[in-house]
Image: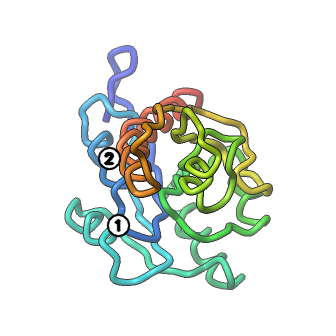
């Protein structure tokens, strides 16, 4: 609950979709636990079983769902029904390595966001850090954007940049970019929900 004009207001329910370790998930959960937080992580969905991110969700007593729903219409319908039943107002993709269907994106238009490890519109898709090194970029970073039917092309919500060091390689850049992702994603969620 949060206070608005002295009244208690229910936190906004969000879902986080993951495919791996869940480090961005953890930063989002920690932000949600603050008293003044606008949102609550009500559901964590993974397309894979036995991943670290699911253990993080369970540690914080958050409902989990394992479903590789992107290749099955019936599974997708089940996921959509759960999101509606749980009154999920925003879906946050955090290292979710699947492409959502056009139907799913249309249904939740303006309510799906993603974090991408580059300064979009530069380096859409995979292998962003390798591209940064190869092209000798001065800066790199992360971008939170709305999800549309075109890959990594939705309206940008927030960007954060870091300088590329001469000694950097793809591993060191990945670690440094991930660190700023953890700060940037929760801020972007708040920015989006503030306009709801």
| Residue extending furthest toward the left | 59
Residue 148 can be seen, yes or no: yes
The structure's colour scheme is rainbow
In the rendered image, which residue does mark 1 sit on?
A: 21
Q: Residue at x 33, y 56 (%)?
A: 23
* Apparent side of residue 76 relative to residue 166 in the rendered image (left or right): right
Circle 1: element type: loop
Which quarter of the rendering shows the C terminus?
A: top right
Can you say whether 53 is above or below 78 in the image?
above
Sort mark 2 into few (<14), some (14-19) or many (20+) by Cα contacts within 10 Å: some
Tell me, for residue 192, which label it has, or none: none
Can residue 115 be seen here? no
Task: Locate residue 166, reporting x and y percent.
Answer: 44, 39
Contact (CB < 8 A) between labels 1 and 2?
no
Q: Residue at x 36, y 51 (%)?
A: 175
Q: Which residue appears at 56% of the width and 69% of the height?
A: 97
Q: Residues within 10 Å of mark 1 (few under 14, many from 20)?
A: some
Residue nearest the viewer, comparing 21 with 82: 21
Q: Is residue 35 above or below residue 14?
A: above
Instruction: Tell me which corner region of the image, top left, top right, bottom left or bottom right, holds residue 195.
Output: top right
Which residue was labeled with disc 2? 27
Element type where label 2 sits in the image: helix
Q: Depth-wise, is mark 1 or mark 2 nearer the camera?
A: 1
Q: CA distance from mark 1 to mark 2?
A: 12 Å
Q: Nearer the viewer, residue 1 or 96?
A: 96
Nearer to me, 164 or 46: 164
- Towards the viewer: 155 or 176: 176
Question: Where does residue 35 sit, x and y in percent of width and height?
Answer: 24, 32
In the rendered view of the protein, which quadrant contains the N terminus?
top left
Q: In this rendering, would 66 be left or right of 57?
A: right
Work out whether 23 lies above or below 190. Answer: below
């Amino acid at each position: 609950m949060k206070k608005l004009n002295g009244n208690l207001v229910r936190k906004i329910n969000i879902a986080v979709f993951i495919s791996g370790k869940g480090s961005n998930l953890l930063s989002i959960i920690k932000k949600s636990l603050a008293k003044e937080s606008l949102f609550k992580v009500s559901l964590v969905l993974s397309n894979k079983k036995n991943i670290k991110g699911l253990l993080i969700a369970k540690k914080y007593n958050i409902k989990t769902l394992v479903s590789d729903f992107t290749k099955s219409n019936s599974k997708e319908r089940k996921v959509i029904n759960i999101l509606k039943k749980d009154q999920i107002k925003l879906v946050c993709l955090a290292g979710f390595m699947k492409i959502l269907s056009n139907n799913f994106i249309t249904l939740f238009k303006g309510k799906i966001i993603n974090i991408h490890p580059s300064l979009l519109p530069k380096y859409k898709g995979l292998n962003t850090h390798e591209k940064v090194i190869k092209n000798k970029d001065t800066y790199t970073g992360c971008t939170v954007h709305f999800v549309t039917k075109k890959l990594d092309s939705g309206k940008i919500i927030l960007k954060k940049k870091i300088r590329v060091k001469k000694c950097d390689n793809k591993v060191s850049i990945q670690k440094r970019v991930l660190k700023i992702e953890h700060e940037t994603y929760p801020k972007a969620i708040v920015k989006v929900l503030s306009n709801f």
